[in-house]
Amino acid sequence: GDACTAGDGGTGELGPGTGGDFDEAAQNRSAILPPELDTYYQELVRTYVIMGSGSLVTEISRLADLLAEAGLSPREVFDFHLLRLGRLVRGLGNRSTRHVMARADLLALELMIHLGECYQRRLHERLSVDDGGCRGQSEHADDAMRQI
C-alpha cells in the first residue's frame, strides 16, 4: 500500500492509522511537541519533494531525535506524517499529488529508519547504564532478544 491508504482503514483518505481517532495517550504525547513543528514538518516535506534527501539528512535525524525524546511510537510518528501530508496535498491535482506522495513515502521511510536508530541507541545506552557498561554489545543484543 501507499501512504495514501496505509492508515485509512480502506477508505482511501489520509489520516491517522487508527481510523481517524488518536488514542488519548497519543494525543497527549503529540501535544507536548512544539506548535512550530507543524509548519517545520510541512516545509521539510516540501523541501524533500523538491530536493530529495541529500541535504536534509541532518534535519531528518534531528527530527527523529525530537520525536523519540517526546516518546512517540513509530505508528504515532507515521500518523503525524500522514496528517501533515494530507494538508500539503489538499487542492493539488492527481498528478501532482502522486508525485508528492511518492517523495513523501521516501521521507517517511527515512524518518522511520532514523527513529528506529534513535530507539536502538537509547536501548543500548540504557542497557549499558543498567549493568555498569561492562558487557559487550552482542551480550546486550542477546539479552534484548530474550526479553522479546
Image (cartoon, rainbow, N blue to C red):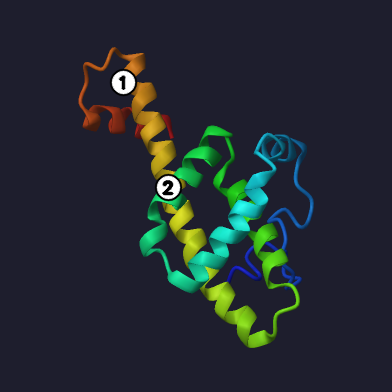
Name which residue lies at 31% across and 14% down: 131
Name the image quarter holding the C terminus: top left
Residue 128 is tagged as 1
**Residue 123 makes an appearance in the image:** yes
Q: Secondary structure at mark 1?
A: helix
Q: In the figure, 15 relative to 12: above or below? A: above
Name which residue lies at 24% across and 30% down: 137
Q: In the figure, 143 relative to 61: above or below? A: above
Which of these two is toward me, 126 or 37?
37
Q: Secondary structure at mark 2?
A: helix
Name the image quarter holding the N terminus: bottom right
Asked which quadrant contains residue 39, the reply is bottom right
Residue 40 place in picture, x, y as percent:
60, 52
Give the residue number, with chain letter if any, for mark 2.
Answer: 61
Q: CA distance from mark 2 to mark 1?
A: 23 Å
Amino acid type of disc 2?
Ser
Which of these two is toward me, 111 or 24?
111
Q: Are marks 2 and 1 in contact (CB under 8 Å)?
A: no
Q: From the viewer's perspective, is 20 left or right of 47? A: right
- Tell me which numbered mark, 2 or 1, is placed earlier along the sequence: 2
Residue 79 place in picture, x, y as percent:
65, 54
